[in-house]
Image (cartoon, grey):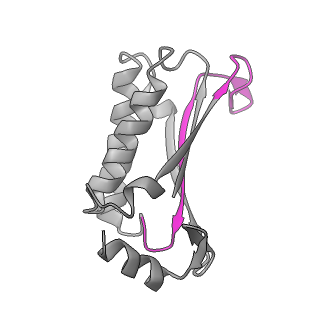
Amino acid sequence: MPLTLTLTEGVLPVGTEKKAVQQITDSFLKNHGLTGNTVMTPNITANVHIVPKGMSFSGGKEFLGAWAEWKVPSFALADRAIQKQHFAEVTDIIYKLSGGKQPKDNIYANVVHAVDGGWNLDGIAMTNEEIGEAISKG
């Protein structure tokens, strides 16, 4: 379940990106009741993209932004309470790691859901049901 964390250069102090990924990953697992799950934990992956200053825009004007985007099976981040809690935590994580300098209204989060059966774990395309079965063993 990949997380793409995109940050305008300077939003976070250099070196804190790893902390952000770890804390966001931990929040995702916690909010789904999967902390310590041996199947799910290694399947939470992440990429960090740093966008040069002057190349992030809001309303067509330069700004400093932060974006956290999840690509997950349709059952993950589907519950409204989990969405609200996790995305609030993501916002707080970025805000705190920025030293309180990144405005919360310039921190964005979203989720993209995969088509059932279009998810691959351990080299095997799995349906939501098959993923659930695998997770239940971990």
Between 39 and 26, the residue placed more toward the observer is: 39
Classify 109 as above or below 31: above
Residue found 57% across the figure and 81% down from its top: 116
User: Which residue is found at the position 51% from the left and 31% from the top?
Assistant: 106
Q: Can residue 116 be seen from the camera position used here?
A: yes
Image vertical order of residue 30 relative to residue 94, above or below:
below
Say which quarter of the image contains residue 114.
Answer: bottom right
In the rendered structure, does residue 62 fall within the stretch colored magenta? yes
In the image, 38 versus 116, the foreground residue is 38
65 displayed left or right of 129: right
Does 54 appear above or below 37?
above
Rendered-image quadrant of the C terminus: bottom left
* Figure quadrant of residue 38: bottom left
Residue found 32% across the figure and 47% down from its top? 27
Q: Magenta segment, which residues?
A: 50-76
* Rendered location of residue 30, percent (x, y): 26, 54
Q: Quadrant of residue 64?
A: top right
- Would residue 104 be found to the left or right of residue 73 on screen? left
Q: Residue at x 52, y 52 (%)?
A: 110
